[in-house]
Image (cartoon, rainbow, N blue to C red):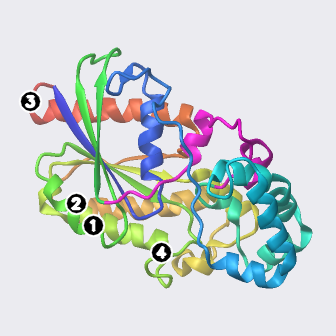
Amino acid sequence: EELTKKIFGTAGVGGAGEVNGGEEGLSGVGVDGDVVYRPPIREVCVRAGSGWKGMLSQVLGEGAQGKNRRLGAVEGGVDNPTTVLAACKEDIIALWEDPVIRGVLKKRGVRLMDMPGFFLNDAARIASTTYDPTDDDIVRARLRTLGVEEHRFTMESGAYPGSEWYIYDVGGSRSMRPHWIPYFDDVQAIIFLAPLAFNLMLEEDPKVNRLEDSISLWREICSNQLLSKTTLILFLNKMDILQATLAAGIRVQKYVPSYGDQPNDVTHVVKYFRDKFRGYHKRLSPRTRPFYWHETSVVDTHATSVILVGVREGILRAHLQSVNVI
């Protein structure tokens, strides 16, 4: 038996992280023969621009050159990122904990800790030549999805052992969306990840709210005739970030005016956006179909695994109903 599902969402919703959580969380799932819960590739990559390096050299002058000479003397040199991070560990920690830096970030409304792939709080542990990523590190790391990626799972135990699952993780940026069409013809279910980080904007268009863009994409998918028989499963994602954002006193109304004067707490915010997605699902679907939704935080692998098991059961039930078995 083969079942296919897709992971949708706009750019930066954590789709790839969702797949990783599924690989680690679904009990009895083997991926190409690898041991369950231990992904074969354990690498965390941190990428950064280079423009800041030139500006920093101008500000620090000889001090920066001295630091470069010190790095050059370290075994491995500046071309080894592990060596560089280990050599700069104390500087990284001091920079992140500096009260002036914290004040500037707060004044500009920048919350780095809410962004994907944030590890500065763990610099003392990570900036080491003996660092070995934990499962939690791997789930929290982010790698942009380019095009369409296929992931295959074989259920080894549980209610349906031996069944094969194909998951297609598709890039969420606007330029990537046209590449989704060829994968629509035989899909049984779509998992749509909608990030509840309501105060973030699209990278490709800073004027567009990321959550509003997710809602717009959801409307297109609900109304698509090719997907009229497809089960749509909504993941209201990044609940942890939503809770931290609201706790910091950031108001939803400032970024989503239609929210109005409703209470600025998690319960009311989640209900507002859930009802909004549900309304479009009901009005725009070409045919009547059930509305499935879950509150998720992909960094919580245990909770995500429980949700994915429930999703699996729902997909199989809908599939059996479609062929009049139940």
Kind of residue at disc 2: Trp
Which residue, given by chain and number where applicable, does mark 4 sit on? Answer: 202
Q: Residue at the spot x=69%, y=52% of the render?
A: 119
Q: Nearer the viewer, residue 95 or 302?
A: 95
Q: Nearer the viewer, residue 130 or 243?
A: 130
Quadrant assignment for the C terminus: top left
Verify whether residue 143 appears in magenta: yes
Q: Is residue 261 above or below residue 4?
A: below
**Label annotation for residue 177:** 1
* Real-space CA distance between mark 1 and mark 3, rounded to the nearest whole angstrom: 33 Å
Asked if residue 158 shows in the view, the reply is yes
In the rendered structure, are the residues bearing label 3 and label 2 in contact, judged by CB atoms less than 8 Å apart?
Answer: no
Q: Is residue 252 above or below residue 285?
A: below
* Real-space CA distance between mark 4 and mark 3, rounded to the nearest whole angstrom: 43 Å
Seen as rendered, the residue at the extreme left is 323
Which residue, given by chain and number where applicable, does mark 3 sit on? Answer: 324
Secondary structure at numbered mark 2: helix
Q: Is residue 149 left or right of residue 325?
A: right
**Label annotation for residue 321:** none
Q: Residues within 10 Å of mark 3 (few under 14, many from 20)?
A: few
Which-is-in-front pick, marks 4 and 3? 4
Q: Position of residue 236 (x, y in %)?
A: 48, 53
Q: Residues within 10 Å of mark 4 (few under 14, many from 20)?
A: some
In the rendered structure, are the residues bearing label 2 and label 1 in contact, judged by CB atoms less than 8 Å apart?
Answer: yes
Kind of residue at disc 4: Leu
Q: Which residues are magenta?
A: 118-146
* Real-space CA distance between mark 3 and mark 2, rounded to the nearest whole angstrom: 29 Å
In the rendered structure, are the residues bearing label 2 and label 4 in contact, judged by CB atoms less than 8 Å apart?
Answer: no
Which residue, given by chain and number where applicable, does mark 2 sit on? Answer: 180
Secondary structure at numbered mark 3: loop
Quadrant position of residue 35: top left
